Amino acid sequence: MLEGLFQPMHLLIIAGIALLIFGPKKLPELGKGLGDGIRGFKAAMSGEEKTIDGNKDERIKKDA
């Protein structure tokens, strides 16, 4: 049922619709925001935090 869902032609159609909806200036900003969100989620799941200057700080873990 889902084996042919993401064929190249389908992806081109989806990219074209996104370009029409958001415009060429907004798409890079959306991609950057999505990437930052994914990186933040991964960092939160692994227990690391990044400070504003980009250095990683380990969270203090308390033993229960």
Image (cartoon, rainbow, N blue to C red):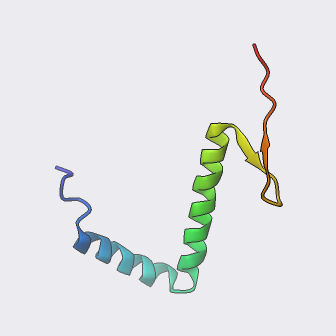
Q: Does residue 12 appear left or right of residue 28 in this picture?
A: left
Using the image as rendered, state which of residue 1 and residue 61 is in the foreground. Answer: 61
Instruction: Find residue 51 and report its horizontal and vertical position in percent.
Output: 81, 53
Nearest the camera: 15 or 54?
Answer: 54
Farthest-out residue, bottom: 24
Please report the residue visible at 57 percent of the width from the left and 80 percent of the height from the top: 26
Q: How many marks?
A: 0
Q: Residue at x 53, y 78 (%)?
A: 27
Q: Using residue 40 as the reference point, say whether residue 24 is left or right of it.
A: left
The image quadrant that residue 17 belongs to is bottom left
Residue occupying the point 61% across, 54% down: 39
Residue 4 lies in quadrant: bottom left
Q: Quadrant of residue 15?
A: bottom left
Q: Is residue 44 above or below residue 33?
A: above
Please provide percent x and percent y for residue 1.
16, 49
**Could you say which is closer to the camera, residue 23 or residue 44?**
44
Residue that lies at the very extreme toward the top in this rendered image: 64
Residue at point 78%, 58% (across, down) = 54
- Above or below — where is 53 with respect to 44? below
Q: Looking at the image, which residue sits at the far front? A: 55
Residue 18, percent across and down? 43, 76
State left or right for residue 47 relative to residue 29.
right
Residue 38: horizontal and vertical position, in percent?
57, 54
Quadrant of the frame with the C terminus:
top right
